[in-house]
Image: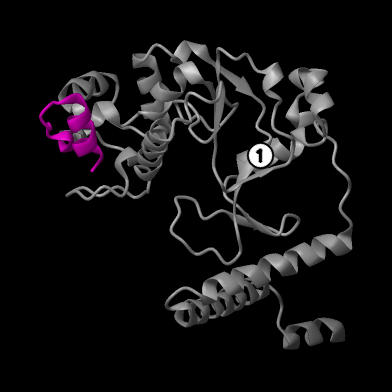
């Protein structure tokens, strides 16, 4: 569908874009092929391109100077950086989760560059052979982050990229069983699943020093080391409660998956076997009851 629209707009014949699937990696996840990838990575760049079409169709591009492209599953532990402290000519992304490329989860960009930041799939659909030859020379394994970095490099925008602290993290509700690349772990203090631990650690650290717009503007965060963050102590009682909460949510989550009874039985069976092995091992080399009695008599 996207290729049909683009070819009509540019009045060009449609090339075989599936030749790009010769590039390995999770970038093509969810695209039907003889070599399916274990991810859903292709959905995100397509949705960004679809967003661009909507912005163009509705005339939104001409009404705003800057755009913030983000995810709906982010939990923000600090206010978003004020645009007044972000260089308007730069592309701003969170500082982390680049995966050998450039973080593709959040972007602050000017009107002048927003089109080139959202049209990542256009060269795949219009110039697949040219793009493939460029990319195969760099590497054979690609993900979305590497793809985005390469795309921005081709457009002359990669050197305009700047970083701001990771003050948010991707989350998933307890009852959300939709397919996802990273299931995450349940965090009782937050009440939901945290998809990426590194994001959560970084955001919680910066939340100790960035609480308002003024904290962004005084620029002290620029010298802050997340490893030096000081947190409020957690009581023993609360830690015990957190443990029970993790167990409860794990059991609830497992009960929704097919075959949970069999997995539960295997879990208890393995637990009993380990208990028996530990018991036998702990008794090896110990004197028997009769031997202890003889020693006492002696």
Image coords of residue 145 (percent x, y):
43, 31
Q: Where is the N terminus found, in terms of image quarters?
A: top left
| Corner quadrant of residue 239 | bottom right
Q: Would you say residue 185 is visible in this rendering? A: yes
- Total numbered labels: 1
| Corner quadrant of residue 223 | top right
Vertical arrangement, residue 15 with respect to residue 157, above or below: below
Residue 263 horizontal side relative to residue 208, left or right: left
Query: Relative to the observer, which residue lies in front, 17 or 280?
Result: 17
Vertical arrangement, residue 77 with respect to residue 284, above or below: above
Query: Relative to the observer, which residue lies in front, 131 or 24?
Result: 131
Q: How crowded is mark 1: few (under 14 residues within 10 Å), some or many (20 or more)?
A: many
Image coords of residue 180 (percent x, y):
45, 54
Q: Where is the C terminus found, in terms of image quarters?
A: bottom right
User: Regarding mark 1 in the picture, which secondary structure is present there?
Assistant: strand
Q: Is residue 219 magenta?
A: no
SS majority, magenta: helix
Query: Relative to the observer, which residue lies in front, 131 or 3?
Result: 3
Q: What segment carries the magenta color?
A: 1-18
Image coords of residue 274 (percent x, y):
57, 73
Q: Residue at point 60% right, 73% down?
A: 251
By what rule are the colours in the image chosen?
one colour
Image coords of residue 80 (percent x, y):
69, 32
Q: Would you say residue 298 is visible in this rendering? A: no
Q: Residue at point 41% right, 29% down?
A: 118
Residue 247 horizontal side relative to residue 175, left or right: right
Q: Residue at point 48% right, 11% down?
A: 159
Query: Relative to the observer, which residue lies in front, 140 or 74?
Result: 74
Q: Residue at point 65% right, 32% down?
A: 166
Residue 191 horizontal side relative to residue 105, left or right: right
Please give the residue where the numbered disc 1 appears in the rendered image: 168
Vertical arrangement, residue 22 with respect to residue 232, above or below: above
């Amino acid at each position: 569908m996207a290729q049909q629209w683009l070819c009509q707009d540019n009045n060009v014949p449609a090339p075989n874009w599936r030749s790009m699937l010769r590039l390995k990696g999770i970038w093509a996840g969810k695209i039907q092929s003889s070599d399916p990838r274990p991810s859903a990575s292709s959905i995100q760049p397509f949705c960004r391109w679809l967003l661009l079409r909507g912005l163009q169709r509705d005339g939104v591009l001409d009404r705003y100077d800057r755009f913030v492209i983000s995810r709906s599953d982010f939990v923000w532990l600090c206010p978003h950086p004020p645009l007044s402290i972000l260089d308007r000519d730069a592309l701003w992304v969170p500082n982390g989760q680049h995966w050998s490329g450039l973080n593709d989860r959040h972007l602050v960009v000017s009107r002048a560059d927003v089109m080139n930041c959202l049209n990542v799939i256009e060269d795949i659909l219009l110039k697949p052979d040219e793009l493939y030859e460029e990319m195969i020379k760099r590497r054979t394994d690609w993900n979305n982050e590497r793809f985005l970095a390469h795309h921005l490099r081709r457009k002359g925008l990669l050197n305009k990229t700047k970083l701001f602290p990771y003050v948010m993290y991707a989350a998933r509700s307890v009852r959300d069983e939709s397919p996802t690349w990273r299931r995450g772990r349940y965090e009782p203090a937050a009440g939901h699943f945290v998809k990426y631990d590194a994001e959560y650690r970084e955001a919680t650290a910066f939340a100790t020093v960035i609480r308002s717009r003024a904290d962004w503007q005084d620029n002290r965060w620029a010298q802050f080391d997340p490893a030096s963050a000081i947190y409020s102590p957690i009581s023993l009682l609360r830690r015990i409660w957190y443990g029970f909460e993790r167990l409860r949510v794990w059991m609830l989550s497992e009960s929704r998956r097919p075959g949970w009874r069999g997995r539960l039985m295997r879990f208890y069976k393995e637990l009993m076997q380990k208990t028996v092995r530990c018991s036998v091992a702990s008794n090896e080399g110990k004197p028997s009851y009769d031997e202890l009695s003889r020693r006492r008599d002696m």
